[in-house]
Amino acid sequence: MARRPSSGLRFQPAGGSRTPQVPAGKKVRLVIERLAGDGRGIAFHEGRTWFVLGALAGEEVEARVLNAQAKVVEARAERILTASELRQPPACRHAGHCGGCSVQHLPHNEQLAFKQRQLAEQLQRVAGVEPLNWAAPLVSPAFGYRRRARIAVRWDVKARQLEVGFRASASQAIVAIQECPVLVQPLQPILLELSSVLQGMSKPQAIGHVELFQGTAIAVLVRHVAPLAEADLAVLEESCERWQAQLWLQGEGAPCARDADARLGFALQPWALELAWRPGDFVQVNAQVNDAMIAQALEWLAVKPGERVLDLFCGLGNFSLPLARTAARVVAVEGVEEMVERARGNAQANGLDNVEVHRADLAAPLADAPWAHEGFDAVLLDPPREGAFEAVRGLAGCGAQRLVYVSCNPATLARDAVELLKQGYRLHRAGVLDMFPQTSHVEAMALFEKRRDARMI
């Protein structure tokens, strides 16, 4: 076939020449300029912004590319060429591979300073505000604090073996774990033996994941994606008996204890309270900081006998029940019906008849809720990461002079603070809650007080 004559034209994509993509696995020398909000180092190289796990400001590192999209590259520090004076050896042998504790190479006091800066910067940048007073961080031991853990489990079809451990950083891969220094001591023996126990089952591919919990009892939840063989159930029961732990199972429905009489919960000892809990329910993983957090919230709200308090996103009653020890009435509101029932049960079990619990969609306006118009002296909010924008908007006119906002995301706290400022509140006090040492996760508490000269904007 004769070749057609060339037209002499060369075609180019409409967007111009494309920047060559950075391949995964490539190693690059970088100088880290500062830390990102998630604790990764930030570097600028060849027109791209690099986010580098395991790197500190001022360091020169050799980084391996994990993922690249357009002008943003995610990488991990493979070698530290010039170390920061702040760098310390991680306490865990799995640091840098396990995705759980991303800032172990930073001393704990520097971790706290980093979290304080994140909170202050968000409040200033988004809301243009700084508290009148900064509270000292609420802390616990830097290790051995975590009372709940989720263990990843996956059946490798090709290798015909079970992978058991924690998710790797920036990956869905599973890192086999021999130790976890942040877990409370009673869970350590279970973690050490769990992999061999599961791999010894006749059908380990039926296991989805495993959760460990230590409270008023130790519990092991096994999530299974197919029915478990009787022999495998016997293995799990024998192991839990050796660990002195309750065995809970979850298939398609809700988690169920193998022993129908099993009781599981956690204590709030300073208030002589015990809250029932089931696997799958939200619970703060750091018991010591949780107690300190409740005590600080109660101190900041300064509820007096005879006052009415509104507790939004109440969960199991973690704040509602301690508040009820002083308040005349606590109105607790939660979005999940199962949690509403458990909060009611917890109030009843602890003999508190001054707590009423309601279900409401807290991501929607609250104007139509009957309890929203009864008036309150104080309000407490403990929302998820999405924040509480609609709930905060719905507080206008409720009469509360004091409001404590407990946040697991400084960005949404700052966003919601803008609305509270419009309603005539001022940011009186704020501080960090170090719920997750060795991680970059920032939790915070803020106290807003109504200005005497407040007018709606």
Image (cartoon, rainbow, N blue to C red):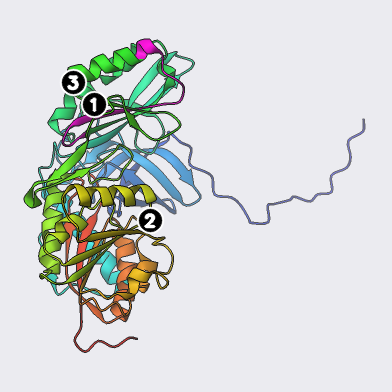
Residue 246 has which mark?
A: 1
Q: Quadrant of residue 188?
A: top left
Q: The residue tagged with tag 1: helix, strand or loop?
A: strand
Q: Is residue 144 above or below residue 300?
A: above
108 sits to left or right of 51: left
Q: Do the CB atoms of the residues marked 3 and 2 lie less than 8 Å apart?
A: no
Q: The residue tagged with tag 2: helix, strand or loop?
A: loop
Q: Is residue 286 magenta?
A: no
Q: Earlier in the sequence, mark 3 or mark 2?
A: 3
Q: Of the residues tagged 3 and 2, which is closer to the observer?
A: 2
Q: Earlier in the sequence, mark 2 or mark 1?
A: 1
Residue 112 x %, y %: 15, 53
Residue 203 x %, y %: 42, 14
Q: Is residue 120 above or below residue 292?
A: below
Query: What amino acid type should be assigned to the residue bearing mark 3?
Result: Trp
Q: Of the residues tagged 1 and 3, which is closer to the observer?
A: 1
Q: CA distance from mark 1 to mark 3?
A: 9 Å
Give the labeled residue for mark 3. Answer: 243
Query: What amino acid type should be assigned to the residue bearing mark 2?
Result: Gly
Give the labeled residue for mark 2. Answer: 335
From where the camera sits, is residue 39 visible? no
Residue 448 has which mark?
A: none
Magenta extent? 214-232
Q: The residue tagged with tag 3: helix, strand or loop?
A: helix
Neighbor class of circle 3 (other Cα within 10 Å; few <14, some 14-19, many 20+) is: some
376 sits to left or right of 109: right
Q: CA distance from mark 3 to mark 2?
A: 35 Å
Neighbor class of circle 2 (other Cα within 10 Å; few <14, some 14-19, many 20+) is: some
Residue 327 x %, y %: 15, 66
